[in-house]
Image: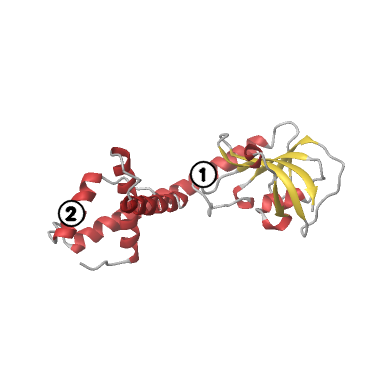
Amino acid sequence: MKTCTVTAKLLLLTVTAVSIISASAQSEIDLEDARNQIGYSIGVNIGMNLMQQGITADVRLDAFMSGLSDALDDTVQMDESAMMTAIQSFVQQQQEAAQSALTDNLAASEAFLAENAQKDGVVQLASGLQYLILESGDGETPTSTDSVLAHYHGTLTDGSVFDSSVDRGEPATFGVSQVIAGWTEALQLMKEGDKWRLFIPPGLAYGEASPTAAIPPNSALIFDVELLEIR
């Protein structure tokens, strides 16, 4: 039976990944077996890719296994039109949920930043970027063409950590113009030795195009940034 659309292929990939994860949780896999290693590695790779894209599905494992078995036995119980209708309904539900999340997250980010702007010591710039000076240095200020060595600790507004050079115990080197817009703006105002807390609106962070499921789309981000050195 031929696949109808790319969407159907994507859904099948999603269902397969979910099923692999569910099955792994239910039974022990002998990972000393070479063929099991291959299957497990493929499953983990697919699962991690889907997680990074924020793709999830409420899939019943028993129904999935029944469909897989029927396809292999050529005894499929639904016609192609009915299956495509089910897939399209699922995709529409996912799209509606994603759009709702975009709207809700943006509203929550704007509310957080509006309240945060009223707190003592918080400075808001014309761009919407906010910062709080934690420690002051007396070094040089980088330009857009410089690279810098910095420590940072990034969280969502609820305190969830999504990235931290501090936790890793090793500062990072990067170009001033090669990071999110909120960082680029802030770094060109900081001096070596400064430590600032940045409150970055979605439009100066990742907006709707989050690079990881750890950062929901349209999230305001908080970074503690310590500018160690201009390179």
One can see residue 189 in this view: no
Residue sitting at x 79%, y 53%: 231
Of label 1 and label 2, which has the lower sequence position?
2
Q: Residue 199, labelled with which disc? A: none
Above or below, 15 against 162 in this view is below
> 131 or 35, which lies in front?
35
* Lateral position of residue 84 relative to residue 100, left or right: left
The amino acid pointed to by label 1 is Ala
Percent of width and height locating residue 109: 57, 42
SS at mark 2 in the image: helix
SS at mark 1 in the image: loop
Q: Residue 214, labelled with which disc? A: 1
Report the Cα–Cα distance between label 1 and label 2: 35 Å
Residue 161 image-quadrant placement: top right
Residue sitting at x 66%, y 54%: 179
- The residue under label 2 is 69
Residue sitting at x 22%, y 58%: 83
Residue sitting at x 61%, y 43%: 221
* Lateral position of residue 133 relative to residue 37, left or right: right
Residue 42 image-quadrant placement: bottom left
> 26 or 208, which lies in front?
26
Crowd around label 2: few <14 · some 14–19 · many ≥20 (10 Å): few
Percent of width and height locating residue 43: 36, 51
Colouring style: secondary structure
Residue 155 image-quadrant placement: top right
Pointer 1 with pointer 2, Cβ within 8 A: no
Image quadrant occupied by the N terminus: bottom left
Marks 1, 2: nearer the viewer: 2
